[in-house]
Structures are given as structure tokens and as C-alpha cells.
Image (cartoon, rainbow, N blue to C red):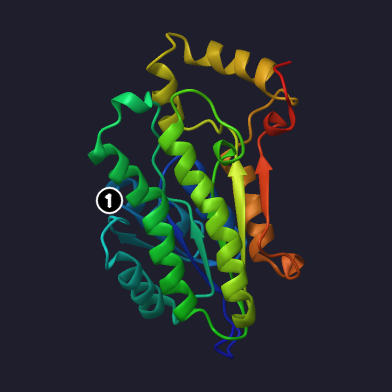
Amino acid sequence: MTNARGATAAKTVIVTGGAGEGIGGGVSAVLAEAGWNVVIVDLDLETGRALSKHLAGQGLSTAFFEADVTMPNCADEAVAFAQSNFGGVDALVNNAGIGMVKDIADVSDEEYRRIFSVNVDAPYRFSRAAVCAIPRSGGAIVNIGSVHALATLAGYTVYAATKGAIDSLTRALAIDCGPRGIRVNCIHPGLVPSPQNRELIRRFADDVDAWLDTYTLRKQLLANLPTPRQVGELVKFFLSDAASAITGQSIAIDGGTSAMLYER
């Protein structure tokens, strides 16, 4: 690829929460395989190092930055890390996020602040830092939201509020960043199989696999759950030149869940 720094080189993308076995890991792997320099930002040191080493073993270009995305200086430090390792930043994927299923009456102020800190404050700070670093020749930001930004369920009040905020943040950023040549779009995944989601389901279902089978039959139009790599492929498209005329948009990848008024 030819980047904005004038040399023939791979472009560089920062992926927050990019080390996990769910969407983050899928995004990091797909982008690395597509030729990007991938800066994986994650709090999980062991998993982050393991993924970076695994991708490097395939001849792919990655670097791991251990960090808590809720720390005020984390975004600026991650950008500096990317610049030090790869010479610049061309794109950002705001993927880091945490879930919550809890009746609103039982949510503490601390829990409320924590989920907003991870799901909203961190993407804001990382976007601000990236906008200042991405070259004037252009770049892109992709936010990972959730179908809960579009319609939700009992117990998801706070989580849905954070993802609704990301949906709005995407449009507002697109307006501010358009004159800078930076495109901003959002992906709203449905239920994606991951250790985090399986653990969440285990709290209310004894047989996770049976619950997932029932979910796809009743809650989706298509009988297969979207995978982390499929989300990664969509991210890759939004970062590519093929999406050079797309900004301020949100798209769901959910097997048709958000298209239905009622269960199948």
C-alpha cells in the first residue's frame, strides 16, 4: 500500500480491545492478513501477546500495546506507540467494550460509570487522538456498536444507552472529520459467538449451545450467527478505498434480527 507518509508501506490501524477471541481478535486477524500494520490495544497482556506472536509467525505486521482504555492518557499513548513502531496512524477501530444485563433498579452508580467509561468515553478519546494523528490525505474510523443501539431487551438499559451514544457519535464525528478527509462509520453486530457472550448466556441458561440454536431459529432470519471474522471483513471494507464515498453510516450484521418486528 502507499500511505500518506509518501513511502510504499503498509498503512497502520489501531484496534482497541483487539486481542480477544471475539470480535476484536477477528478484526485484528483480518486486517493483518489484508496487509495492515495492526496495533492491538488490550488490557489482557497474555492474550494480546499470544495473538500478536501468532500473527507475526505468519509473517504479518502487528504490535501489542497493553493498556486500560479507560485511562485518560491511554489514547494518546497508543497513538504515540503506533507512530513509534510504524511511523504513523491511518485508521482506528473502536472495538473495546463491555456488556451488562441487569435490571435498571439494580445498577449501581459505579457500574453505570464503568460501562460508559469503556463503551463511550474511550471511543471518544481514541477518536480525538486519531483525528489529530491521521494524515490530511485521509483515513477512517470504524466504531463497533451493537444491535442494541437500534432495539433492545429488558435488562439492557445501560448497555443499550452506550451503544446508542456510539451510533450518534459516529454521525457527529463524520461531520467534523469529513473536511479532514477522515471517514467515520459504525457496525452494529448482533449476537456473535465469543467466550464473553457464552459466559453471559451461561448466567441464565444451563445449555449454552441449545440456547444459541434456539436464538438463531427464533431471533434471526438466517440460521447462522455472524462470526468475528465476518465483522472483521466488514471493518476491512469500511477502511478500504472501496468505501471512500461512505461516511456517517451504520450497518447491522445480525442475521436479520433487527429487520423483524416479531420472532420467527
Q: Residue furthest top?
A: 206
Left-right relation of 27 to 199? right
Percent across and percent down for residue 101 are: 40, 27
Percent across and percent down for residue 116 are: 36, 47
The residue labelled by disc 1 is 45
Q: Residue at x 23, y 40 (%)?
A: 110
198 and 165: which is toward the camera: 165
46 and 170: which is toward the camera: 170
Residue type of the residue flagged with mark 1: Leu
Left-right relation of 68 to 237? left
Q: Residue at x 64, y 43 (%)?
A: 230
Q: Residue furthest front?
A: 105
Percent across and percent down for residue 111 are: 28, 38
Of the 4 image quadrants, the one containing the C terminus is top right
- Number of other residues with Cα within 10 Å of mark 1, as a class: few under 14, some 14 to 19, many 20 or more: some
Q: Is residue 25 visible?
A: no
Of the 4 image quadrants, the one containing the N terminus is bottom right
Left-right relation of 183 to 85? right
The correct choice, above or below, for 102 with respect to 230 in the image is above
Q: Residue at x 33, y 51 (%)?
A: 117
Secondary structure at badge 1 equals helix
Callout count: 1
18 and 251: which is toward the camera: 251
Q: Residue at x 67, y 42 (%)?
A: 252
Percent across and percent down for residue 50 are: 36, 49
Q: Quadrant of residue 221?
A: top right
Q: Is residue 191 visible?
A: yes
